[in-house]
Image (spheres, grey):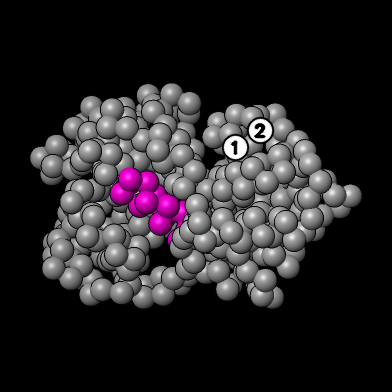
Amino acid sequence: MLRIAINGYGRIGRSLLRAIYENGYRQQFQVVAINELSDIDTISYLTRYDTTHGRFPKPVSVDESRLIIGEDSIQCFSERDPANIDWKSLNIDLVMECSGSFSSRHDAQRYLDAGIPRLLLSQPASSEVDATIVHGFNEHDLSNQQTIVSAASCTTNCVIPVFDVLQKLCGLEHGTTQTIHSAMNDQPVIDAYHTKDLRLTRAAISSIIPVDTGLAKGIARLMPSLSGKIECNAIRVPTLNVSVVDMVVRTNSDVTVEQVNDALRNAATSKYAGIVGFTQEPHASVDFNHDPRSVIIDGTQTKVVDSRMVKLLCWFDNEWGYANRMLDVAVQWAMVLKS
């Protein structure tokens, strides 16, 4: 069993903990520690109650600086610099880095220097890290020599399986994606001096707001054949959770709507079972809240123009789906370490 710690107990950090207890990962992981810049009572409260995902499925209480979940005791810290924590004394095997503050190998090295043997980042990282893994696509790239790994982003986990299926079906010449993403905590509720990005100073609940995205770089890193061929945009919308990628690609060979949908439907029950979903029901975004898959293709929205231009609508729960993929990467890494 892997002894893990969570650094940064925000939306993804709390989703990780919940998924460990809710989706059967507790057999693989024991959460030993949480580091979050908040007091223990607030940590407990936000664990027990969640507007998006509902009440925590296990009893939660507090014992001094420890979060008690059932019979499990989790030491909680409140250190701005995680290097100040004596991780080694806790016998931690892996830290799930969910603060969003460490994206370069240089910064992440502070964990290793503090006694952590391995680090899994909940965000895209610089090319100097050992690997960027999208579970279902390239988890075979994990090795027991690696120490700093990124689980990419929620949007990368959404689009890479789809591009992989399309590349094998009909080849990809070029394309664009538009991510329509739920509001996030880097946005203020009302206009405020919140960030140097002027668009992100505007009220999250009142506007559709264009934001920057590094998705194209993430696609190129994982699928070098698409480098320079995919461009990506993103906007934030006033919803709590569940996002969608509107994808348009030009294919190398003729294809029909039926062929595209069949290929994606088959992927959802074979190579990408549990990762890709396929539906032809008339859904709204809320229907995919708390959905653990990386992407769900809305087959009713698949379009083909002039036999070579394919348009897809790809739903994903940007919190829950991604947290479950992080845990899948950790499970795979643990298996590699044992082999």
Q: Confirm whether residue 55 shows in the render.
A: yes
Q: Residue at x 77, y 59 (%)?
A: 257
Q: Which residues are magenta?
A: 319-332
Where does the image place residue 217, in percent across and percent down from the top left?
A: 60, 33
Nearest to the observer: residue 101 or residue 42: 101
Where does the image place residue 226, in percent across and percent down from the top left?
A: 66, 33
Q: Magenta stretch containing residue 331, yes or no?
A: yes
What residue would you read off at disc 2?
226
The amino acid type of the residue labelled 1 equals Ile
For residue 333, side relative to residue 314 (left or right):
left
Where does the image place residue 225, in percent across and percent down from the top left?
A: 64, 30
In 3D space, how far apart are the residues under numbered discs 1 and 2 (Cα atoms)? 7 Å
Q: Residue at x 85, y 49 (%)?
A: 307
Q: Residue furthest left?
A: 89
Q: Magenta stretch containing residue 145, yes or no?
A: no
Nearest to the observer: residue 273 or residue 22: 273
The amino acid type of the residue labelled 2 equals Leu
